[in-house]
Amino acid sequence: MKNILLILLMFTPAITTAQKMMNLQECLEMGLEKNYDLRITRNEERRAGNNVTLGNAGFLPEVTLNSGYALRNSSSDQYPADGGDALQTRHAGTGTLDAGIQLNWSLFEGFRVQTNYKRLQELQTIGELNSRLAVEDFIANLTAEYYNYVQQQIRLGNLKYAVSLSRERLRIVEARYQVGSLSRLDLQQARVYFNADSSLLIQQYETLHRSRIRLNELMGSDVEQHFLAADSTITFDEKLSRNMLFDAALQHNTLLLLTEKNKTLSELELKNLQSRNYPYLRLNTGYGFTHYDYSSGTLDRQRNWGPNVGVTLGYTLFDGFNRIREQKNARISIQNRELEIEKNRLALESDFANMWLSYQNNLELTKLEIESLRNAELNYEIAMERYKIGDLSGLELREAQNSLLEAEQRLLSAQYNTKLFEISLLQISGKVAAYL
């Protein structure tokens, strides 16, 4: 028994020395600020926002500045048509320096530019929805883990109580064994039960430790940070409105909104392809300067400069029917996106119905387990009184103790499961941020 107590004392400081108490809101606020996945998702959202510019869509012209210098060395023989002497030139050098600025601007491309800008805006909205989805998933996961941590703390307390009951029973058996009223078998049996309960308690410390590490990981905090959950019970809302949640799910479910945005992108892709049905008009203008240096001939140097401007009007008459094929495929993609919306809406309705049924069942189960726990507590009290006066065997007392511990665990599991389904219902309806 001394060895068991020593082991328990070795595990206890990791929990009892914690001074900091954190509630759910504090954990969520820390996680929303520091969680690495959320920070990455927000950066992706910022990148999508940076892409929404007139230049990226193609509204603005392209202006280029270029210059260069070329040196040419050549030799030539020229033979007059009248049969005169040939004119020979050897190693004649020509240096050319040029510089210019050029502007190219697509004035019209069948509304492709306007479509591109709308597409960039939709991609920005999708980035925002992805961030919203990541935040919702994070809130749901951290809330679930927080209440799992609460559950493990409560279970730790239940197991401590079970160990104290076994310790008291062992004390009674040892006292009776000393006076000869109980056998050595009864003493060994009491020690076995105490060791078994102590083993469960040691394992529970490890389970609680793992849950705390998982919480710290979600919060982006040091995994060795010690804290206790401020909540000592698992609470849940017993008056959720099915109709309100269902309507909110159809209107605000993030996954469904993302599917609808994918359809919008497919529609814009079709419009982009349809822009090739129109002619295009492009403007080209610039200003150039060229300087020549000659080492032979009648001129020593020459300079040319001035502006240039031109427009190009074009239309693709035939491209191997690729334009028609691509637009047909784009229309099929839109049909697929519409089918995906209907499929996801049906899946949403199915998931919601299952979650609501499970939520209601666990509410009723919680009420039943509360009554079962009261009966188990009363049953154990009666069993202990009878055991003290010698009217009950050790096996029967152990059975009453196990019934009490099992009733506590069943109630705790029912409460936690109810909370999980509450979280899922709020998440699927886009209201999980209420935990903040």
Image (spheres, rainbow, N blue to C red):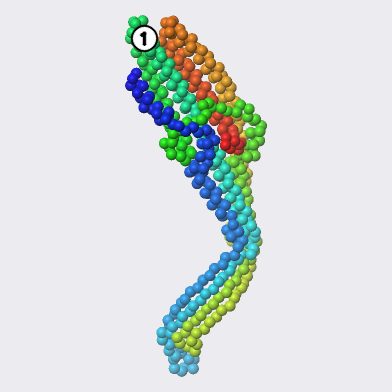
Q: Give the x, y percent position of residue 428.
A: 59, 36
- Please give left or right for residue 72 compared with residue 264 in the image: left
- Identify the residue at image location x=64%, y=30%: 242
Q: Give the x, y percent position of residue 229.
A: 49, 31
- Please give left or right for residue 8 compared with residue 318 in the image: left
Query: Closer to the camera, 81 or 401?
Result: 401
Query: Closer to the camera, 210 or 117?
Result: 210
Is residue 343 shown to the viewer in this render?
no
Query: Closer to the camera, 366 or 57?
Result: 366
Give the quarter of the figure containing the C terminus: top right
Q: Pointer 1: what residue?
A: 175
Question: Which quadrant would residue 106 be assigned to in this image?
Answer: bottom right
- Identify the residue at image location x=45%, y=87%: 296
* On screen, residue 424 above or below 283: above
Q: Give the x, y percent position of residue 192.
A: 36, 16
Query: Closer to the camera, 332 or 24?
Result: 24
Give the quarter of the figure containing the N terminus: top left
Label 1 sits on a secondary structure element that is helix
